[in-house]
Amino acid sequence: MKETYKILIVDDEPSILDMLKLQLESEGYVVYTAINAKEALDKLSNCPDIILLDINMSGMNGLDLCVSIRDFVSCPILFLTARVSEQDKINGLMAGGDDYITKPFSMSELLARLSAHLRRENRSHKKTKNKFSEELIIDYSDRSLYIKNNRIELSNKEFEIIQLLSANAGQVFDREKIYEIIWGFDRNGDSAVIKEHIRKIRSKFSEYTEKAYISTVWGVGYKWIK
């Protein structure tokens, strides 16, 4: 059976996104689109096999986005841009990009380059499941968390609480349920320990961000805020 590859396209021109999505889906790719860096960070949780990334975007541009994610994303990144100078190409490669396609480009050229990069990609490597936001990265495989590029030191149980809540963002868990999932039914203990662990997590987060990623739903429990 032919493998289905996932592509993330990041471009601030909706017409280009629509055109590429239509063309690439017709070729059998699963396509995710993002119109800015913020959307792209959210879509990275889909673990794309390859990324098409425009450089000239408002807000965080493609070069800065590439730099911020490259240590956590191993798939090929191809820049799409109207820039044509040699220095621009060097900047793109230095930022962590793998290739550079200049607009306007033919669809046949793009498909050929996508195919070539995917062939070279070692598909046997285990993919790392990550969660991204503008300032936070959670590496579930490495059991690590970064806020504004600062690694937050967490105990095993603290990370497991974060993993449970963040992987089910928006879902409310009461303290008893969190205790059951993480400590297990056969463990002796009081679910009140969850409250203390949440307090410690928030304290560590507060050193680097004002955002409260874990929200208290009074009388119910806790949930992760997207």
Image (cartoon, rainbow, N blue to C red):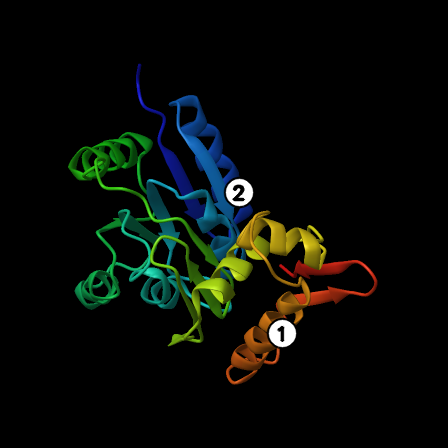
- Horizontal side of 153 relative to 219 (left or right) equals left
Quick one: label 2, few (<14), some, or many (20+) residues within 10 Å?
few
Residue 4 lies in quadrant: top left
Residue lying furthest right: 219
Q: Nearer the viewer, residue 154 or 20?
A: 154
- 49 and 172: which is toward the camera: 172
Quarter of the figure with residue 91: bottom left
Relative depth, front residue between 196 and 57: 196
Residue 10 in the image: state x and y as whole percent.
44, 50
Q: Is residue 91 visible?
A: yes
State which tag comes first along the sequence, 2 or 1. Answer: 2
- Check the image and name the residue furthest to the top: 1
- Left or right of 35? Residue 10 is left
Callouts 2 and 1 close, C-beta under 8 Å:
no
The vertical placement of 96 against 119, above or below, is: below
Residue bearing mark 1 = 196
User: Measured from the top left, where is residue 15 in percent x and y?
Assistant: 53, 42
Instruction: Name the foreground residue: 75 vs 28.
Output: 75
Residue at the (20%, 66%) spot, across then down:
94
Mark 2, residue position: 15
> Which quarter of the figure is the C terminus placed in?
bottom right
Vertical relation: 32 (above or below) 136? above
Describe the element under mark 2 as helix, strand or loop. Answer: helix
Instruction: Indicate the amino acid at tag 2.
Output: Ser
